[in-house]
Amino acid sequence: MSENKKAEKIVGVKGMNDILPADAPLWELFENTVQSVLKSYGFLQIRTPIVEPTALFARGLGAVTDIVEKEMYSFVDSMNGDQLTLRPESTAGVVRAAIEHNLTYEGPKRLWYAGPMFRHEKPQRGRYRQFHQVGAEALGFTGPDIDAELIMLCQRLWDDLGLQGIRLELNSIGNAEERNRHRADLIAYFEQHKELLDADAQRRLHSNPLRILDTKNPAMQEMVNAAPKLLDYLGEESLAHFEGVQKILRHNSIPFTINPRLVRGMDYYNRTVFEWVTDQLGAQGTVCGGGRYDPLIEMFGGKPTPACGFAIGVERLLELMKASGEKFAQKLCDVYVVHQGEAAGMQAFVVAERLRDAGLDVVLHCASASAGGSFKAQMKRADASGADFAVIIGDDEVANGSATVKTMRGENADNNQTTVAFEEVADYVVDQITCSDGCDHPDHHHHH
């Protein structure tokens, strides 16, 4: 390679995005809120592998679904010939783990997960090939109460994140027998109106006619709206369950609309299905989808166990948070430590550690190629860090055993600096922070 040729740049995989440090405060706020809300309902986290046997998804999602047909990242492990897949969703893996480790043996379980999923779709706004979901799965509960609890948990999450304008849509898709009766009538109905079906609908007519109800094609809307409705096919038990969910939601003032067109692409859903939708993201309206999937655990070889859950598309929800206009600016630290000279540099480390012992976030200025180490350059960095205080240590400070503490924010920031003995710097800064709202108790402790 000749001297002057620059190495070629490698860029990331299409549709798989870097989450950059500027977005970290937003992700952290979201993740911390999710964790505290789920904890407040007694859910425990489960972390399953990102790679699962391909057969898990082929069986669970149904071989004719879009996901299995053309969106999964599947490959053969060249070391041993195993057929593996990057998970396109997490329910199948959680259920596999629950069966494998007998999780519901001593009673029902409330579980939640968070992490990346992978689908080979066309990347567009709010849709990526590696995307993140947070979800909950409640295994072993039969009644409508858990369905309602999951919905109320979502509502609490939106409230805690300060999000408005997320609407709840609800439906029941009954059981397999009720769906089969409806499906037969639906196919017959569509065949009567075959001349109105587009290519997509014709392809789905016999494999997955429910998906035709989902069509966005305006030419088909009127015909689709008049199609037989699944709700009219529900038996007594399914209806009672659905009514039970609605009753709890009404009693807790959770508004919803019943959307008889709400269906699921996966084979294993039954009874309650719900979606949280918003108009604030353009066409990509759904931020959270969920429902019951009582048949799945038996399909995977476990003892028949009822189950219910939901999944949230994290990227979409973060777009909503950004759109809500809240500022998620985060200061890098509470204190920035500025120093010059070797002895001062040594002392600066000690002071920085003491400040951290006191529960503060501290950035210690370290040498870099670009920024000269002059006080002026360092103070610029200190200012940019958003720190409330700069602690300054130079030769003079080392000589008299004290640091200069400068207030960086507020109206008197310009001329407000104090000399403080090294061993008292941490206490002094903590007192300044806890007493910035005008208290005069010097013995208050700051818990960060």
Image (cartoon, rainbow, N blue to C red):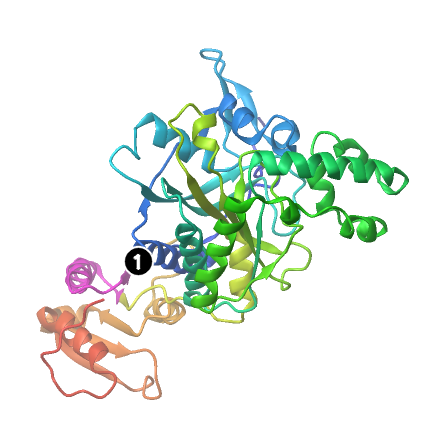
Quadrant for the C terminus, please: bottom left
> From the viewer's perspective, is 128 left or right of 133?
right
Q: Is there any visible trace of residue 4 in the rendered image?
A: no
- Image quarter of residue 200: top right
Above/below status of 324 relative to 168: below
> From the viewer's perspective, is 66 left or right of 370?
right
- Give the residue type at disc 1: Ser
Looking at this view, name the residue that lies furthest to the top. 80
Quadrant for the N terminus, please: top right
Image: magenta residue range? 338-366
Magenta residue check for 349 = yes
Q: Position of residue 425 (x, y in %)?
A: 15, 72
Residue toward you, 203 or 430: 203
Q: Is there any visible trace of residue 11 in the rendered image?
A: yes
- Which residue carries the number 1 mark? 40
Q: Residue at x 67, y 36 (%)?
A: 181
Above/below status of 36 relative to 116: below
Q: Position of residue 125 (x, y in %)?
A: 64, 52
Looking at this view, name the residue that lies furthest to the right. 195
Q: Where is residue 61 in the image (x, y as percent from the top left)?
A: 56, 31
Magenta residue check for 344 = yes
- Image quarter of residue 405: bottom left
> Would you call the spot at circle 1 few (<14 residues within 10 Å), some (14-19), or many (20 or more)?
few
Residue toward you, 209 or 123: 209
Which SS class for mark 1?
helix
Q: Residue at x 34, y 84 (%)?
A: 410
Looking at this view, name the residue that lies furthest to the front. 236
Residue toward you, 194 or 355: 194
